[in-house]
Amino acid sequence: MRKKILSIVLAATMVFGMATTAFAAPSPAIKGTITKVEAAKDKNGNAVKLEVKEISAANLAPEQVAKVEEVKTTAGLKTVIESVIEAAKAAITAGTIGTATNVLPEELVTVFEEAMAKGTLVVADVKDIVAPADAVFPLEMTIAVDGATAGTKGTLLHLNGTTWEAIKTTFGDGTATGIFDSLSPVAVVLDNSTTTGATTATTTSTATSPKTGENATWAVVAAFVAVAAIGSAYAVKRKRA
Protein backbone atom coordinates (compact mmCIF):
# COMPACT_ATOMS: atom_id res chain seq x y z
CA MET A 1 0.00 0.00 0.00
CA ARG A 2 2.82 2.38 0.87
CA LYS A 3 4.39 1.72 -2.53
CA LYS A 4 1.07 2.55 -4.17
CA ILE A 5 0.79 5.83 -2.24
CA LEU A 6 4.37 6.74 -3.17
CA SER A 7 3.59 6.07 -6.83
CA ILE A 8 0.56 8.37 -6.64
CA VAL A 9 2.60 11.17 -5.05
CA LEU A 10 5.36 10.88 -7.67
CA ALA A 11 2.84 10.83 -10.52
CA ALA A 12 1.11 13.96 -9.18
CA THR A 13 4.44 15.74 -8.87
CA MET A 14 5.32 14.94 -12.49
CA VAL A 15 1.93 16.15 -13.75
CA PHE A 16 2.13 19.49 -11.94
CA GLY A 17 5.78 19.88 -12.94
CA MET A 18 4.72 19.59 -16.59
CA ALA A 19 1.99 22.19 -15.96
CA THR A 20 4.61 24.60 -14.64
CA THR A 21 6.49 24.38 -17.94
CA ALA A 22 3.31 24.80 -19.95
CA PHE A 23 2.28 27.93 -18.05
CA ALA A 24 5.68 29.66 -18.38
CA ALA A 25 5.17 32.78 -20.52
CA PRO A 26 7.85 33.98 -22.96
CA SER A 27 9.48 37.36 -22.29
CA PRO A 28 8.10 40.22 -24.44
CA ALA A 29 10.17 41.30 -27.42
CA ILE A 30 11.98 44.59 -27.25
CA LYS A 31 10.47 47.09 -29.68
CA GLY A 32 11.43 50.58 -30.77
CA THR A 33 15.20 50.13 -30.68
CA ILE A 34 17.44 51.78 -33.27
CA THR A 35 19.35 48.92 -34.84
CA LYS A 36 21.18 50.64 -37.72
CA VAL A 37 21.06 53.35 -40.39
CA GLU A 38 19.33 51.88 -43.42
CA ALA A 39 20.20 54.75 -45.76
CA ALA A 40 21.23 58.40 -45.77
CA LYS A 41 21.76 61.02 -48.46
CA ASP A 42 23.01 64.58 -48.29
CA LYS A 43 21.69 67.83 -49.72
CA ASN A 44 23.06 66.92 -53.14
CA GLY A 45 21.56 63.43 -53.16
CA ASN A 46 24.85 61.69 -52.46
CA ALA A 47 24.89 58.63 -50.21
CA VAL A 48 26.38 59.25 -46.78
CA LYS A 49 27.72 56.64 -44.39
CA LEU A 50 26.57 57.33 -40.83
CA GLU A 51 27.70 55.69 -37.61
CA VAL A 52 25.40 54.65 -34.76
CA LYS A 53 26.94 54.84 -31.29
CA GLU A 54 25.75 54.26 -27.77
CA ILE A 55 25.32 57.34 -25.59
CA SER A 56 28.64 57.91 -23.86
CA ALA A 57 30.47 60.67 -22.03
CA ALA A 58 33.44 59.83 -24.24
CA ASN A 59 31.56 61.05 -27.32
CA LEU A 60 29.29 63.79 -25.95
CA ALA A 61 29.51 66.87 -23.78
CA PRO A 62 28.33 66.42 -20.15
CA GLU A 63 25.34 68.71 -20.82
CA GLN A 64 24.22 66.49 -23.71
CA VAL A 65 24.54 63.31 -21.67
CA ALA A 66 22.45 64.95 -18.94
CA LYS A 67 19.75 65.89 -21.48
CA VAL A 68 19.63 62.32 -22.74
CA GLU A 69 19.22 60.91 -19.25
CA GLU A 70 16.56 63.51 -18.48
CA VAL A 71 14.38 62.70 -21.50
CA LYS A 72 14.36 59.05 -20.46
CA THR A 73 12.42 59.93 -17.33
CA THR A 74 8.65 60.38 -17.27
CA ALA A 75 8.92 63.97 -16.07
CA GLY A 76 11.68 64.80 -18.55
CA LEU A 77 9.76 63.38 -21.50
CA LYS A 78 6.65 65.29 -20.46
CA THR A 79 8.62 68.56 -20.43
CA VAL A 80 10.13 67.89 -23.87
CA ILE A 81 6.81 66.88 -25.44
CA GLU A 82 5.08 69.96 -24.04
CA SER A 83 7.85 72.05 -25.61
CA VAL A 84 7.59 70.43 -29.07
CA ILE A 85 3.79 70.69 -28.98
CA GLU A 86 4.10 74.39 -28.17
CA ALA A 87 6.56 74.83 -31.07
CA ALA A 88 4.13 73.03 -33.41
CA LYS A 89 1.22 75.25 -32.37
CA ALA A 90 3.39 78.34 -32.97
CA ALA A 91 4.24 77.03 -36.46
CA ILE A 92 0.55 76.45 -37.15
CA THR A 93 -0.20 80.05 -36.19
CA ALA A 94 2.69 81.31 -38.33
CA GLY A 95 1.62 79.17 -41.30
CA THR A 96 4.97 77.36 -41.53
CA ILE A 97 3.86 73.97 -40.18
CA GLY A 98 3.61 72.48 -43.66
CA THR A 99 7.19 73.22 -44.73
CA ALA A 100 9.19 72.93 -41.50
CA THR A 101 11.13 69.68 -41.08
CA ASN A 102 12.11 70.17 -37.44
CA VAL A 103 8.65 70.51 -35.94
CA LEU A 104 5.92 68.09 -34.89
CA PRO A 105 3.33 67.67 -37.70
CA GLU A 106 -0.04 69.26 -37.04
CA GLU A 107 -1.86 65.91 -37.10
CA LEU A 108 0.28 64.60 -34.24
CA VAL A 109 -0.36 67.46 -31.81
CA THR A 110 -3.63 66.02 -30.52
CA VAL A 111 -2.28 62.44 -30.77
CA PHE A 112 0.65 63.32 -28.52
CA GLU A 113 -1.50 65.22 -26.04
CA GLU A 114 -3.83 62.24 -25.70
CA ALA A 115 -0.96 59.73 -25.52
CA MET A 116 0.69 61.71 -22.74
CA ALA A 117 -2.59 61.79 -20.83
CA LYS A 118 -2.98 58.01 -21.23
CA GLY A 119 0.66 57.30 -20.43
CA THR A 120 1.33 55.48 -23.72
CA LEU A 121 3.96 57.88 -25.07
CA VAL A 122 7.43 56.52 -24.40
CA VAL A 123 11.09 56.99 -25.28
CA ALA A 124 11.94 53.63 -26.84
CA ASP A 125 15.62 54.27 -27.57
CA VAL A 126 18.31 56.95 -27.83
CA LYS A 127 21.44 56.66 -29.93
CA ASP A 128 24.25 59.01 -30.95
CA ILE A 129 24.32 59.17 -34.75
CA VAL A 130 27.51 60.59 -36.25
CA ALA A 131 28.01 61.99 -39.74
CA PRO A 132 31.38 62.38 -41.50
CA ALA A 133 33.02 65.79 -41.30
CA ASP A 134 32.45 66.48 -45.01
CA ALA A 135 28.70 65.70 -44.95
CA VAL A 136 26.58 68.37 -46.66
CA PHE A 137 23.44 69.09 -44.63
CA PRO A 138 20.50 68.72 -44.55
CA LEU A 139 20.63 64.93 -44.54
CA GLU A 140 17.70 62.63 -45.18
CA MET A 141 18.17 59.62 -42.95
CA THR A 142 16.28 56.34 -42.68
CA ILE A 143 16.99 54.28 -39.58
CA ALA A 144 15.88 50.76 -38.72
CA VAL A 145 13.41 50.88 -35.82
CA ASP A 146 12.29 47.49 -34.58
CA GLY A 147 8.49 47.24 -34.27
CA ALA A 148 7.63 50.32 -36.33
CA THR A 149 4.91 50.13 -38.99
CA ALA A 150 3.33 52.56 -41.43
CA GLY A 151 0.63 53.09 -38.82
CA THR A 152 2.99 53.91 -35.96
CA LYS A 153 2.39 57.27 -34.29
CA GLY A 154 5.56 58.87 -33.02
CA THR A 155 8.51 61.06 -33.86
CA LEU A 156 12.26 61.20 -33.91
CA LEU A 157 13.71 63.75 -31.52
CA HIS A 158 17.05 65.39 -32.27
CA LEU A 159 19.22 66.96 -29.57
CA ASN A 160 20.18 70.25 -31.24
CA GLY A 161 22.86 71.49 -28.90
CA THR A 162 21.09 71.05 -25.56
CA THR A 163 17.52 71.42 -26.85
CA TRP A 164 15.36 68.56 -28.09
CA GLU A 165 13.52 69.26 -31.34
CA ALA A 166 10.94 67.10 -33.10
CA ILE A 167 11.81 65.86 -36.57
CA LYS A 168 8.99 65.38 -39.08
CA THR A 169 9.09 61.59 -39.26
CA THR A 170 7.70 59.07 -41.72
CA PHE A 171 7.36 55.55 -40.30
CA GLY A 172 7.40 52.42 -42.43
CA ASP A 173 7.68 48.71 -41.75
CA GLY A 174 10.64 48.66 -39.40
CA THR A 175 11.90 52.10 -40.40
CA ALA A 176 11.73 55.80 -39.54
CA THR A 177 12.80 58.58 -41.93
CA GLY A 178 13.48 62.24 -41.24
CA ILE A 179 15.47 65.24 -42.49
CA PHE A 180 18.18 66.60 -40.19
CA ASP A 181 20.03 69.94 -40.27
CA SER A 182 22.71 68.46 -38.01
CA LEU A 183 23.34 65.20 -36.19
CA SER A 184 23.90 64.25 -32.57
CA PRO A 185 21.76 62.11 -30.21
CA VAL A 186 18.49 60.93 -31.76
CA ALA A 187 15.61 59.57 -29.68
CA VAL A 188 12.70 57.41 -30.85
CA VAL A 189 9.44 58.50 -29.21
CA LEU A 190 6.45 56.24 -29.85
CA ASP A 191 2.83 55.96 -28.92
CA ASN A 192 3.19 52.51 -27.39
CA SER A 193 -0.30 51.51 -28.50
CA THR A 194 0.59 51.86 -32.22
CA THR A 195 3.64 49.56 -32.47
CA THR A 196 3.73 45.83 -33.21
CA GLY A 197 4.42 43.74 -30.13
CA ALA A 198 5.52 45.08 -26.77
CA THR A 199 7.67 48.18 -26.49
CA THR A 200 10.31 48.13 -23.80
CA ALA A 201 10.59 51.78 -22.93
CA THR A 202 13.09 53.77 -20.91
CA THR A 203 10.18 55.39 -19.06
CA THR A 204 8.47 52.25 -17.78
CA SER A 205 7.46 51.61 -14.17
CA THR A 206 10.02 50.15 -11.76
CA ALA A 207 7.48 47.82 -10.12
CA THR A 208 8.78 44.24 -9.85
CA SER A 209 6.67 41.49 -11.43
CA PRO A 210 6.75 37.86 -10.30
CA LYS A 211 9.25 35.70 -12.13
CA THR A 212 7.89 33.52 -14.94
CA GLY A 213 6.51 30.24 -13.51
CA GLU A 214 6.87 31.42 -9.91
CA ASN A 215 3.15 31.10 -9.09
CA ALA A 216 2.95 27.74 -10.87
CA THR A 217 5.87 26.45 -8.79
CA TRP A 218 4.00 27.24 -5.58
CA ALA A 219 1.00 25.39 -7.01
CA VAL A 220 3.18 22.28 -7.46
CA VAL A 221 4.42 22.49 -3.87
CA ALA A 222 0.88 22.88 -2.53
CA ALA A 223 -0.37 19.97 -4.62
CA PHE A 224 2.49 17.76 -3.47
CA VAL A 225 1.80 18.49 0.19
CA ALA A 226 -1.93 17.89 -0.27
CA VAL A 227 -1.44 14.51 -2.00
CA ALA A 228 1.13 13.42 0.57
CA ALA A 229 -1.19 14.36 3.44
CA ILE A 230 -4.09 12.42 1.95
CA GLY A 231 -1.89 9.39 1.37
CA SER A 232 -0.49 9.47 4.89
CA ALA A 233 -3.94 9.77 6.43
CA TYR A 234 -5.18 6.83 4.39
CA ALA A 235 -2.19 4.69 5.40
CA VAL A 236 -2.70 5.46 9.10
CA LYS A 237 -6.41 4.64 8.84
CA ARG A 238 -5.63 1.28 7.18
CA LYS A 239 -3.03 0.43 9.81
CA ARG A 240 -5.44 1.13 12.67
CA ALA A 241 -8.11 -0.90 10.99
Image: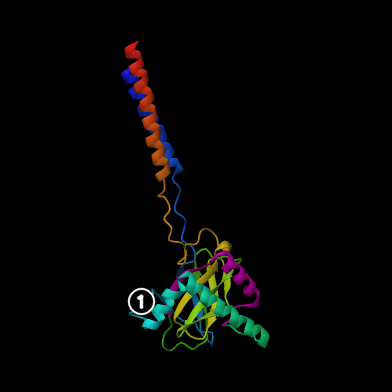
- Verify whether residue 121 appears in magenta: yes
Q: Is residue 83 above or below residue 226?
A: below
What colour scheme was applied to this rendering of the protein?
Answer: rainbow
Other residues around mark 1 within 10 Å, as few (<14) / some (14–19) / many (≥20): few
Q: What is the span of residues highlighted in magenta in the rendered image?
A: 102-129
Q: Position of residue 35 (x, y in %)?
A: 45, 68
- x 52%, y 71%: residue: 189
* Residue 127 in view, yes or no: no
Q: Position of residue 205 (x, y in %)?
A: 46, 61
- Return the residue at label 1: 56
Quarter residue 105 falls in: bottom right
- x 36%, y 21%: residue: 233
* Residue 29 in view, yes or no: yes
- x 36%, y 31%: residue: 225
Residue lying farthest to the top in this orientation: 241
Q: Nearer the viewer, residue 13 or 209?
A: 209
- Verify whether residue 200 appears in magenta: no
Q: Nearer the viewer, residue 154 or 109?
A: 109
Quarter of the image where the N terminus is located: top left
Q: Position of residue 34 (x, y in %)?
A: 46, 70
Q: Nearer the viewer, residue 235 or 3?
A: 235
Amino acid carrying label 1: it is Ser
Q: Position of residue 111 (x, y in %)?
A: 62, 70
Q: Is residue 151 above or below residue 61?
A: above
Quarter of the image where the C terminus is located: top left
